[in-house]
Image (cartoon, helix red, strand yellow):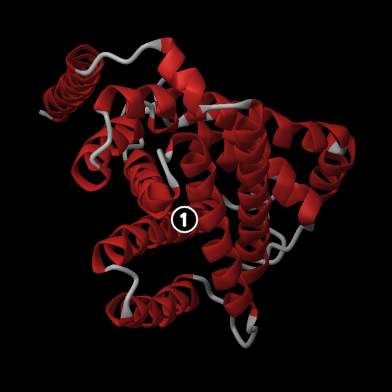
Amino acid sequence: MPTVLKTTMRLLRSWGMLLWFTSIAAFVVWGLMSQPVSPAAILERIGLMQVLAALALILAGKFLTILLVGHVLAAFGESRGLKFAWYAYSIADIAKYLPGGIWGITGRLHIFHRAGIQLWHAGRMLLVETLVLVAFSFSVGALAIVSVRLGWDYRSSILILAALPVLALTVRMLIPWGESARWVTTTAQQLLAWVCFGCSFAVVAAPNWNAFATVAGIFNVGFAAGTVAVFAPSGLGVREAVIAWLGGESAQANTRLLIELAVIHRFIWIAADFLTLIPALAFRKSVNARMAVSTPDAGTSPGS
């Protein structure tokens, strides 16, 4: 009976993934065919300075995310320094593009295990980190979209002021800081990170300054959706579909143009991923040496 159940679950998961990707592909094809856009129209929207600005903003956001990795490690009693956090983040970040959508997770768990961190401990840290990222990505994006709709008046100010302590409390509750007040710093860093990530897309895709905040918010919400869809490599297809859908609803943008700009932005993001990897490769030997010292045997976990 267990074998039959496992087989049934495997088939359901496989067919479910196939159905999801088929739906995403159908939506993208519909958007590309229903609203034709010439290559010239895209080139008019994107220049070299915009690409460089988007790249710089993504790199800034990634550095702030690496700081989050370090903070989570330290809060769980596994402080290994900035180099280790950078290495663990950037190596696993490249693995996320492999088919299956789970290699970014397994890659990080493998690195943590080599560093002498027990699997259950590593899993808890990765889960907490992911929850923080999704919470800030979605919240910053939703706040931007709603604030634009409210006209950036006193109502949006109240909404933002109410959301900030909620996000701070979320960080405080998810991460076991003890007596440390670093959760305040982490909250500020993550707010800035997702402002950078959202603006990196708006620099490329916003048709004008009036739509800048809305487009930035749409990207962040799409990123959160792609992160939750763990079966999709780097949220591929999911992020773009949400961006196109919300763009048509909130920004009244051309669906095909948004999809194509989202694809271009993804290529810029991939370039940022590899640029972030370069420093990690530079100090790989020192990190590996420290991990070898930290693992006298596979069953121990320093600091846990």
Rendered location of residue 183, percent (x, y) = 58, 76
**Relative height, residue 256 to residue 230 (above, below):** above
Q: Secondary structure at mark 1?
A: helix
Who's the residue at 32% across and 15% down the image?
37
Q: Position of residue 108 (x, y in %)?
A: 58, 40
The quadrant in which the C terminus is found is bottom right
Q: Is residue 78 visible?
A: yes
The residue at the point 15 percent across, 20 percent down is 19
155 over 87 or under it: above or below? below
The one of 112 and 42 positioned closer to us in this rendering:
42
- Do we see residue 121 in this rendering? no
In the rendered image, which residue does mark 1 sit on?
133
How many residues crowd around disc 1 within 10 Å: few (fewer than 14), some, or many (20 or more)? Answer: many
Q: Residue at x 52, y 34 (%)?
A: 104
Q: Residue at x 36, y 79 (%)?
A: 157
Give residue 250's position: percent from left, percent from top.
Answer: 23, 48
Q: Nearer the viewer, residue 43 or 27?
A: 43
- Quick check: 115 left or right of 258? right
User: Is residue 84 placed above or below 235 in the rendered structure?
Assistant: below
Q: Is residue 269 left or right of residue 20?
A: right
Nearest to the observer: residue 57 or residue 4: 57
Left or right: residue 165 compared with residue 31: right
Percent position of residue 6, x then y: 19, 27
Residue 161, by quadrant, is: bottom left
Amino acid type, residue under disc 1 in the picture: Leu
